[in-house]
Amino acid sequence: MSKIRVLVGTKKGAFILTADGKRKDWKISGPHFAGWEMYHLKGSPADPNRIYASQTSGWFGQIIQRSDDGGKTWNTPGSSPEELKSDGGMPKGESNKFVYEGKVGKHLWYDGTQHPWEFKRIWHIEPSLTNPDVAYAGVEDAAIFKTTDGGKTWKELPGLRKAKGNLWQPGAGGMAVHTILLDPKNEKRIYVAISAGGCFRTDDGGKTWKPITRGLKSPYELPDPDAEVGHCVHRITLHPSKPDVLFMQKHWDVLRSDNAGDQWNEVSGNLPTDFGFPIDVNFNEPETIYVVPITSDSLHYPPEGKLRVYRSKTGGNEWEPLTKGMPQKDCYVNVLRDAMAVDQLDSCGVYFGTTGGQVYCSANGGNSWNAIVRDLPAVYSVEVQTLP
Amino acid sequence: MIRVVLPFHLRNLARVDGEVQLDVPAPVTIRAVLDKLEEHYPTLRGTIRDHGTLKRRAFVRFFVCKEDLSLEPPETLLPDEIVSGAEPFLIVGAMAGG
């Protein structure tokens, strides 16, 4: 029977939740890296035992961790005694060295001046679909880095910041590449999303990038609601069988694109509010999508204190609330952008974590939910591995 | 031997218990101690000072013989008590202020 491994990043450590395919009885391990902010953990599709993790701290900066045994043990990549000495005998230890390529450059600052890019942390790690030694890192201040040696060293793909990066401006939550999507049918095509920056695509493996924001409207956030960059894209997702179809949860509005982001159309339909953070697609049904409506940009909790996932089986516009097993009163948690994921079983499992420390699972596509765990630190990210 | 006390999270990261002891050749400066520390524990690189600039991270402090040397230049010579090992060089995570 298949096995499920859920990787949970929280404000105070990482947790690994495992169960068999029934998804009823869960084992919880952790906290791993106790006390550190764990922005994201993700396993390699090419080697599920390899897991990359972003470990960060306001005091001590960024650390990259890697497990090669499914999360049992962890090391900073390249940290064996042999690897830590360069030819000259000096220490290397460069797995957390994230230096922008070339002239650092500047972006728009809060006061209208230009401000130099400053590396702060990694929000998201996206392992290659085919090579376990290759992964991409989405960083704050917004940029994308790539490793080709299993995380020992990282190099920026500077073309992204040339896509009008001088006009990107941080929002209150910072300016980060928080979403990276790899096209499973075209290895040269990558999508990224940036808070208060927008959405971008490369078709040449990361050398050049272009904004893909036509159809996005931000009348309350931008002086020009149709601006090419600056839209606060919260999350994008795709189904591997139809990678040209993208779904987006923007600051406000849920949208879809049927042409790889060249044009977006709003599909918020009958949602009670179209503000929110995560969005995901059912593994078995490419037109079934999930969002978690949040009251507003000023009130980051569910409307009416009711925790509801909304599901559309029509690729948007027509939405139904999913409530069974979730609190329907006095609930004021949030669900962050990287905190929802799906598994790949026949009856698709849907998972999300909350800022209140609950991790919910639905083993039936959202029809009913159970809390796997209720009292973790605030959940930053949830990823799921479906193992043989 | 120079005695270095690391904060909790860096001890875990470096996988050490208690104090770290380093053989630092003269002249024993702040920079010389940090260089030797990172040489022995490369996973600490980037956590105490930035990779590129080698500037002290904002919320890391250096305490020496009840003095805060965090703002002193890296070339600052450390006192005899540190050089002799009578007193430890303290690397401290600054108070969060919460």
Image (cartoon, coloured by chain):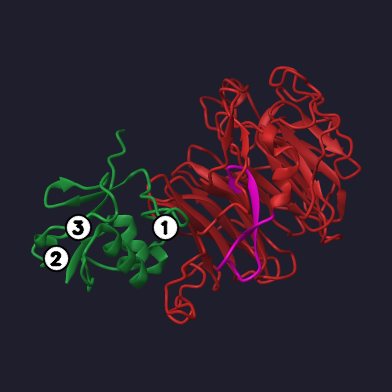
Chain colours: A red, B green
Residue A28 visible from this viewpoint = yes
Mark 3, mark 1: which one is toward the viewer?
A: 3
Kindly identify which residue carries mark 2: B83
Instruction: Check if mark 2's residue and mark 1's residue have beta carbons within 8 Å.
Output: no
Residue A22 visible from this viewpoint = no
Task: Evaluate whether label 3 is on the same chain as label 2.
Answer: yes
Image coordinates for residue A109, horizontal then vertical, percent? 58, 29
Query: Which of A39 and B3 lies nearest the eye of the viewer?
Result: B3
Q: Earlier in the sequence, mark 3 or mark 2?
A: 3
Q: Residue at x 82, y 62 (%)?
A: A187
Q: Residue at x 64, y 37 (%)?
A: A324
Q: Residue at x 82, y 25 (%)?
A: A269
- Disc 1, SS: loop
Quick check: A167 left or right of A6?
right
Q: CA distance from mark 2 to mark 1?
A: 33 Å
Q: For the residue carrying disc 3, how many other residues have a C-alpha within 10 Å: few (<14), some (14-19), or many (20+)? A: some
What span is colored magenta in the figure?
Answer: A139-157
Residue type (three-letter) at the residue carrying disc 3: Leu
Query: Which of A179 and B23 lies nearest the eye of the viewer?
Result: B23
Image coordinates for residue A32, horizontal then vertical, percent? 43, 59
Residue A33 disc label? 1
Instruction: Check if mark 3's residue and mark 2's residue have beta carbons within 8 Å.
Output: no
Residue type (three-letter) at the residue carrying disc 2: Val
Counting labels gives 3
Q: Chain of mark 2?
A: B
- Disc 3, SS: loop
Vertical placement of B3 versus B52: above or below?
A: below
Residue B77 disc label? 3
Quadrant of image for the C terminus of chain A: bottom right
